[in-house]
Image (spheres, grey):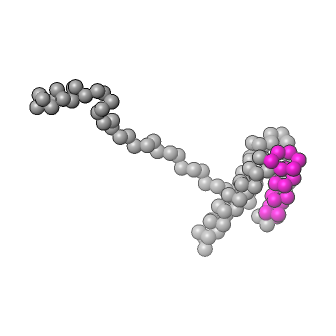
Amino acid sequence: MREAQAALNALPDDALPTPVTAPAPTAPEPALPHTLPDITTYLQGVLTEHLGGRAAPHAAKLSACRDLTELGALVPKMVVKIKLTIHEQAGNALKDAFAQCMAAHAAQETARA
């Protein structure tokens, strides 16, 4: 027993195994919006994040949409206009956010069926 203890004491510190720790739990990703008011608010937030005060006229157009079909027709036009006249990255962010929201809406509709 003393020989084993002496052998362990003789080893350098980095030769001993280190305890394995479990990774820290990550917070679940927030659910994407799937209703018209929630999607509109989410898209307005994306625009505001990227455009600041310049997002106001675009946010007003989003708010004026009466249904998802109207919103679906407006967003691609808005993306092109923003990319050409303001900022390409902001247009891409709006396009991606809308695609994610529509996927969440489709998943919600599928779950209801």
Please tell me whether residue 110 is drawn above or below residue 9 in the rendered image: below
Asked if one can make out residue 93 in the rendered structure from this viewpoint, the answer is yes
Q: Residue at x 45, y 42 (%)?
A: 24
Residue 52 in magenta?
no
Asked if one can make out residue 65 in the rendered structure from this viewpoint, the answer is no
Please state the total of marks drawn on the protein image: 0
Asked whether 87 or 113 is in front, the reply is: 87
Compared across the picture, whether 113 is left or right of 76 comes to left
Asked whether 62 or 18 is in front, the reply is: 18
Compared across the picture, whether 15 is left or right of 46 comes to left
Asked whether 62 or 80 is in front, the reply is: 80
Location of residue 55 (image quadrant): top right
Which x, y percent locates residue 57?
87, 48
Please tell me whether residue 105 is drawn above or below residue 43 in the rendered image: below
Which x, y percent locates residue 102?
70, 62
Q: Residue at x 62, y 65 (%)?
A: 107
Which x, y percent locates residue 22?
40, 43
Which x, y percent locates residue 86?
86, 45
Residue range highlighted in magenta: 70-88
Location of residue 51 (image quadrant): top right
Q: Residue furthest left?
A: 1
* Quadrant of the frame with the C terminus: bottom right
Q: Residue at x 18, y 29 (%)?
A: 7
Main secondary structure of the magenta stretch = helix
Q: Residue at x 84, y 55 (%)?
A: 80
Residue 80 in magenta?
yes
* Quadrant of the frame with the N terminus: top left
